[in-house]
Image (cartoon, grey):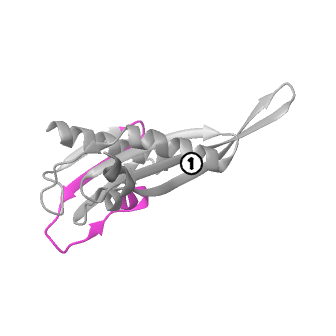
């Protein structure tokens, strides 16, 4: 278990500054979205917030490691087509022949790279929100893990 956590790659997908009105003024915090993966089919996603950026990133990494899922890949690609919707973000993933590469945009490319998927075609519909796209990708991986 410890060996697996040592070889995990981490990628900060987005950091957002969040401000809210309070009676004493503005309260400022930072939210971080982080993906972790071992480039062999395991992937995790964490979203956390804190008063400072490094603390938010560390919390998100810890959350992502807790939420790791293992994928059954078909060589260097996904086993079958999958379409997933999360809030306003909708993604379509299709397997691709070896050597095609990652035909995906936004955070999908970074997530698939961390998961070890090197040949896939992806299309984003609806929202381009990085957080919603990331969680849609996580939901797609969960469905693939269960074989749905």
What residue is rendered at 37% in x and 45% in y? 44
The quarter of the picture where residue 77 lies is: bottom left
- Name, please, the residue furthest toward the top: 23
Q: Is residue 85 positioned above or below 53 on the image?
A: above
Q: In the depicted view, which residue is nearer to us: 141 or 40?
A: 40
Q: In the depicted view, which residue is nearer to us: 25 or 43?
A: 43
Q: In which quarter of the image is the C terminus?
A: top left
Would you call the spot at circle 1 few (<14 residues within 10 Å), some (14-19), or many (20 or more)? many
Percent of width and height locating residue 135: 39, 42
Asked if the magenta segment contains residue 147, the reply would be no
- Name, please, the residue furthest toward the front: 2
Percent of width and height locating residue 14: 54, 53
Q: Is residue 108 positioned above or below 98 on the image?
A: above
- Name, please, the residue furthest toward the right: 24
Percent of width and height locating residue 57: 56, 48
Residue 148 seen from this side: no
Name the side, left or right, on which 133 lies relative to 71: right
The quarter of the picture where residue 121 lies is: bottom left
Percent of width and height locating residue 46: 46, 42
Q: Is residue 72 positioned above or below 47 on the image?
A: below
Q: Range of the magenta residues?
A: 86-110
What residue is rendered at 24% in x and 58% in y? 40
Residue under pointer 1: 57
- Looking at the image, how many numbered discs can be counted on the residues? 1
Asked if the magenta segment contains residue 98, the reply would be yes
**Dot 1: what SS?**
helix
Q: In which quarter of the image is the N terminus?
A: top left
Q: In the depicted view, which residue is nearer to us: 36 or 76?
A: 36
Name the side, left or right, on which 73 lies relative to 14: left
What residue is rendered at 13% in x and 68% in y? 97
What residue is rendered at 41% in x and 44% in y? 45
């Amino acid at each position: 278990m410890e060996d697996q956590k040592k070889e995990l790659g981490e990628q900060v997908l987005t950091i957002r500054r969040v401000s809210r009105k309070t009676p004493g003024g503005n309260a400022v915090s930072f939210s971080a979205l982080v993906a972790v993966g071992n480039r062999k089919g395991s992937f995790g996603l964490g979203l956390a917030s804190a008063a400072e950026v490094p603390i938010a990133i560390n919390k998100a990494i810890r959350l992502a490691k807790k939420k790791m899922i293992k994928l059954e890949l078909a060589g260097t690609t996904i086993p079958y087509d999958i379409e997933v919707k999360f809030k306003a973000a909708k993604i379509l993933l299709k397997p691709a022949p070896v050597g095609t590469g990652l035909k995906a945009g936004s955070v999908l490319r970074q997530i698939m790279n961390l998961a070890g998927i090197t040949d896939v075609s992806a299309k984003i519909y609806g929202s381009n929100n990085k957080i919603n796209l990331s969680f849609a990708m996580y939901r797609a991986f969960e469905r693939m893990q269960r074989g749905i």
